[in-house]
Amino acid sequence: MNQPAPTITTGPLPASRKVHLPGSLHDIRVPLREIALSDEAPLTVYDSSGPYTDPECQTDIASGLPDLRGAWLRARGDTQAYAGRAVTDADNGFAQGKRLTPRFPVSRQPQRARDGGAVTQLAYARAGIITAEMEYVAIRENEGRLAAAARDGESFGAELPDLVTPEFVRAEIAAGRAIIPANINHPELEPMIIGRNFKVKINANIGNSAVTSSMEEEVEKMVWAIRWGADTVMDLSTGRNIHNIRDWIIRNAPVPIGTVPLYQALEKVGGIAEDLTWEIFRDTLIEQAEQGVDYFTIHAGVRLHIIPMTAKRVTGIVSRGGSIMAKWCLHHHRESFLYEHFEEICDIARAYDVSFSLGDGLRPGSIADANDEAQFAELRTLGELTRIAWARDCQVMIEGPGHVPMHKIKANMEEQLKHCHEAPFYTLGPLTTDIAPGYDHITSAIGAAMIGWFGTAMLCYVTPKEHLGLPDRDDVKTGVITYKLAAHAADLAKGHPGAQRRDDALSRARFEFRWQDQFNLGLDPDTAREMHDETMPAEAHKVAHFCSMCGPKFCSMRISHDIRAQAEQQAGMDRMAELFREGGALYVPQKQDEPVD
Amino acid sequence: MNQPAPTITTGPLPASRKVHLPGSLHDIRVPLREIALSDEAPLTVYDSSGPYTDPECQTDIASGLPDLRGAWLRARGDTQAYAGRAVTDADNGFAQGKRLTPRFPVSRQPQRARDGGAVTQLAYARAGIITAEMEYVAIRENEGRLAAAARDGESFGAELPDLVTPEFVRAEIAAGRAIIPANINHPELEPMIIGRNFKVKINANIGNSAVTSSMEEEVEKMVWAIRWGADTVMDLSTGRNIHNIRDWIIRNAPVPIGTVPLYQALEKVGGIAEDLTWEIFRDTLIEQAEQGVDYFTIHAGVRLHIIPMTAKRVTGIVSRGGSIMAKWCLHHHRESFLYEHFEEICDIARAYDVSFSLGDGLRPGSIADANDEAQFAELRTLGELTRIAWARDCQVMIEGPGHVPMHKIKANMEEQLKHCHEAPFYTLGPLTTDIAPGYDHITSAIGAAMIGWFGTAMLCYVTPKEHLGLPDRDDVKTGVITYKLAAHAADLAKGHPGAQRRDDALSRARFEFRWQDQFNLGLDPDTAREMHDETMPAEAHKVAHFCSMCGPKFCSMRISHDIRAQAEQQAGMDRMAELFREGGALYVPQKQDEPVD
């Protein structure tokens, strides 16, 4: 038995096995997924899925994942264990008895920086140190490639190296252009990097609803999302049991976990925004930092003077964090406590290396509100906060878009680069029209692919249920696959040197009627196989040199093969094409008297 | 009983009724769909669905649709009925007995131009005549708007008028920048226009498979596709009964029907491409023109000297028409009979006003093959053919893309405008990555939205089954809705003056928790309602001022309302925002001593 709870999905993807590459600077093993192919060398691809897809690995959610980073952290010798904050009833929304999700069975002491030091990847990078995390992500980004590939794309100023080196990673982090969200209290993490000069990443949101979710359910949501490619997961839980469920998630998460601490803080004051205080918020930050949350969304850009700019909007303030802070500010007629205490927030973050995701509390919720003064005024504030965080060695990314029509997307990226000093951009969608509820994974994938191309480093997924309800398991998968394809389309267009390998391998398989290879190279082999089987279920058809769309007599791919074979017999089409190019407008056959066939 | 066959979907979309606007030049009634809203004036939108969504209209597929255009055609007096070509056994693939689809019950004589004249919309437009068809599409394009709207967008040289006038339509057609595909033998047609300076349109493909489809099934596929917004439908049938099934489709089609005549011609020669002849092809054109096909895909750009340019491709030739012609050309080592006889093809088309969709037989089938020399050499040939067709008063559009990464999409539009003299572009997708079989409606919606924005006039849909199998009913709907949202995103980005009305209406409904209005304004009200009901089924929740995602305490939209109410009490947020703008960096409250709440 691999799992105590049968609800956790484990096992490799079809035709895939986990392979590990060693480091040369550090004692690390970097996981990749190798897809076996029937008629060519296997293809190695990025693998966000963690140990759950590794049959060699026993996973048990009551034990948590292995302590991958513990030795690295100890080797640095700049952190120390301490008693930590006591968990209170309020942390779990006063859930009692049967309604209380059990605590995670294995207790651990939190770590923090010694002597007020900075234990962030940014501090190390600035000090010229290449950490194990940095080498890990460098190897991971190369996906097993050893050589440069042909370059083709328009990068809009991004500078993608042929191969990512550990030193390149260090330099990008030192410049603030990339982050490795990696709380020192999340040793189970397989590090990943977010930055414009790396592969475009995606985030999936999970979170318990008002209806009680069990901890197995929440862990499974996370495992399911990363199985299909989510690079980070945000736990947006509200209601009861937030603390305990988050413990189960983090202890079992090989990807960075992000949160919006404001949500939990609001629960602690009974959902009354006006009752929030800096002290309650601060306590929540420490609670979550000790648990191992890797990045915090902080809506410190919602300043008092900006709020009135939303008055004429069609959809007002649609970010939950933004609206909570706006309500607080207006009620007290005071500047936001997040803004006023931002330096103290930084001091907490640097002691644990919690990265910031500076929240776009005023992102537009409709086409009508896109790129308005409120949105851009907040963005400029996020730029100010970036400098403050950087001065304290904190890692920063910036949240953006929402609903933005295509012609206004590029301006978002340009304004962000300009005002936020090239800190990585992390955008929701954007949705490119408002008129398709039920299909907003698609309205937003259009915008996500484009903004990813323009330079956004991570795309926050949108599921088909956006605006309508809570995503179920199928919606999560649909959202993740949709965003993986958008991120990949962005990598291709940017000219990422490794991106086209997978397209080419899949297209070769398609052209050569290697059906199984075509399925297995796709982002969702199971769905592709099922769709094929609906029309042509027999096993024999998966080796057929035609498909259901045209049938055997009418297959264009088959005709292309015939053409190629004919042409090759006839002294080679390459030579003919060359002759054509030399001869100009008219094609000169080599042997005019003989028919081709 | 509205229908003899229960499989034909009829009845209005939710909260919608059919309204008709009259012409002022011609005796016409132009259908639109009016969506009733609970708290504001109804919204009138474009309606491709024909009489099937009109409860006032009795539809019976054995009778066909009303003869809408008959009087218009008779009034022009330039056509005449004639005996027409006799239907042969070969036209139906020699289907016999029970396997033969019955003929359409009502027989009619075909019409053609008198005395070798041109009865095309292009000929009339050039002669300064505003036809009923032109006035019809002008009214239709305005969607009931009476006034200009605020302009916002980047049109890349498209010139979208505030309101479309009949004279504008005439001038665009005369310039070759737009077409109205409207065979004189398709009097049931509700005319529509395809051009860069009009709303972006979408096409859905249907067609019987090897497994016998009944005529009801095929008619229902068409009715289902136009219900959700397909502007034209291509019948790509192969196999038996092609002729008779097409009769049933056209007699019941309120939208233009396109075909690839080469497919039927190939059936007539037993599927052996080499056995095709000009005579068989010519006979097929006349057969289909007499039936009322509105546009023909003609792959006349696959010239002998271009074919070798495909030899090095990863996926060769993926267009079925292109591969058939390539095989023929190479086998006979002769120039394509389509190219050599193109002027005669034009003479047939002008006698019936069949528009051309000049086929992209060499479109790329993979990212690796995008924008290669074969593709662009063919495109330039299509530009030559455009001039030939225009010289004979034939209407022309140009087929394009396939698989193209984002950074190579714009070049396609620019090359097409340059070499094809602004004839409308009609593109498949393009798919922006190859790695997501099962999700190619999405990989292609990204490209479709972008190329539509850049200037493509009509987008050919892609369903989730692309590359895998035959689309079923759900796939057709998914493909159509996906492409409607992509076309609409393009209209928004181009700055179409009427496009944002629907987004704004839906966003207002969303902000005001008018759930039913939000569903009804969406492209797919049924799916939106179902998704909402999965989480919050009770009827009461559809009037709730919150939704399932956040619950009552935690709703950002509700908080925004609270903020707005507070601000309005406090002397108005507009004034405060104004003060802020006047005052510069710091917000000056009007009454500093009083708290806001």
Image: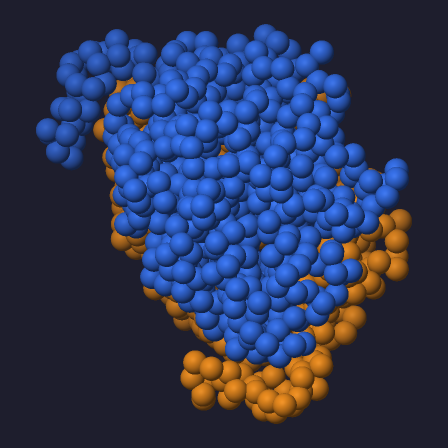
Chain colours: A orange, B blue
Between A310 and B152, the one nearer to me in the picture: B152
The residue lying at 50 percent from left, 76 percent from top is A150
Corner quadrant of residue B411: bottom left
Corner quadrant of residue B243: top right
Q: In the rendered view of the protein, which quadrant contains the N terminus of chain B?
A: top right
Q: Describe residue B194's horizontal placement relative to residue B498 as left or right.
A: right
The residue lying at 32 percent from left, 16 percent from top is B564
Between A448 and A73, the one nearer to me in the picture: A448
Q: Where is residue A587 in the image (x, y as percent from the top left)?
A: 51, 83
Q: Where is residue B373 in the image (x, y as percent from the top left)?
A: 47, 73
Between A236 and A187, the one nearer to me in the picture: A236
Is residue B153 in sight in this rendering?
no
Q: Describe residue A62's horizontal placement relative to residue A289 as left or right.
A: right
Outermost residue to the left? B582
Is residue B122 in sight in this rendering?
yes
Q: Describe residue B183's horizontal placement relative to residue A584 as left or right.
A: right
Q: Is residue B116 above or below residue A436?
A: below
